[in-house]
Amino acid sequence: MPQIDPLFTPLKLFKNAFVSTVYSGLFRRLKIHQKRERINLSDGDFLDLDWSYANLPSDELIILLHGMEGDGQRPYVTGVARHFNNNGVDAVCVNFRSCSGELNKKFSSFHSGQTNDLNEVITHITVNYEYDSLFLKGVSLGGNIVLKYLGENQNIPTKLKAAMAVSVPVDLAASSKALHQFKNILFHIYFMIGLKYKLMQKQRQFPEKITRRALYSVWTLRKLDEVYTAKANGFKSAADYYKKSSSLHFLSSIKTPVLLLNAKNDSFLTPSCFPYEMAQMSKYLFLETPEKGGHVGFISKGGVYYNEKRALEFFREFQ
């Protein structure tokens, strides 16, 4: 499918990628009532799901996946949930392992390619709830999981009609390098504060699996992936983790309509995160690349952000 002409025009204040990214991620505030459900996973761990509902009973549901160091209450997912609720669609925000305010049980936690958990969530929903149509939307790390899930899975439920992925580092190795550049140093520090704290908790929980010396050696995202993420999840190294978890390698196999929205001024992304040729050759991969938007920014007037409006428009084409 040819590239979609971008329709997003940012407000003047938010043309700057840094301002757009920071405001959307840290300063946006909105209220939404959510009900939490805990599900048990096949490996003995658990996930927490945060549900919100349309005013009237709905037969449609959007499943939302957050980004790195996020959770199911972050405005970039609850904003989507609220917009869909207001338009007659129920929503469920998935909290990845250790992201719901409680440490998970296993040594491994969430990672960028963890599609097994998403598969279990979708199975749980299809078995226990009577929705006719499911939609899937992921942001950043969550978007990579969405794209990888769609590309690697040949048994997508027929109820899953369409998906959207926003601000996605489809090439994890390249985006990891970008996050270590000086232009992203504040974001790198922000991520590391939360991740290092969780790693300290893991060390106390499993002292036989990670030493304090190893813990103290972790000062960068790359080192964290080398010392913990890769080893805890069965990868040989950080490089092996990035290679096997990058959704870029799965895009050509996608058979479900999906919209990938990546802004050209997103400092987390590199040229390899804009798969123009793959989109042109695919019937299912729709690619939209506005000049502005930042990383999960796309701030619009009226309290509903562009990516939220765009998701509902796109999904309505395939309901």
Image (cartoon, rainbow, N blue to C red):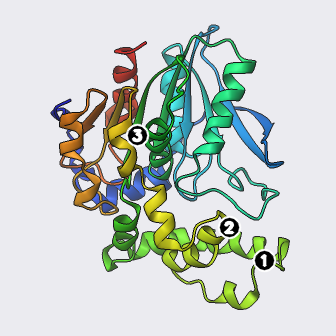
What's the distance in space between the residues labelled 1 and 3, CA to CA?
34 Å
Residue 93 is situated, as x and y percent measured from the top left of the image, at 61, 36
The N terminus: image quadrant: top left
Mark 1: which secondary structure?
A: loop
Residue 63: quadrant of the picture: top right
Closer to viewer: mark 1 or mark 3: 1
- Whether 107 is drawn above or below 131: the answer is below
Q: Earlier in the sequence, mark 2 or mark 3?
A: 3
Mark 2: which secondary structure?
A: helix
Mark 3 residue crowding within 10 angstroms, few (<14) / some (14–19) / many (20+): many
Identify the disc placed on residue 89: none
Residue 34: quadrant of the picture: top right
Question: Label 1 amino acid?
Answer: Lys
Residue at the (36%, 48%) spot, across then down: 297
Residue 76 is situated, as x and y percent measured from the top left of the image, at 48, 43
Q: Which residue is mark 3?
A: 165
Of residues 31 and 170, the one nearer the viewer is 170
Give the total number of marks visible in the rendering: 3
Question: Label 2 amino acid?
Answer: Ala
Q: Which residue is mark 2?
A: 232
Q: Which residue is mark 1?
A: 209
Of residues 9 and 122, the one nearer the viewer is 122
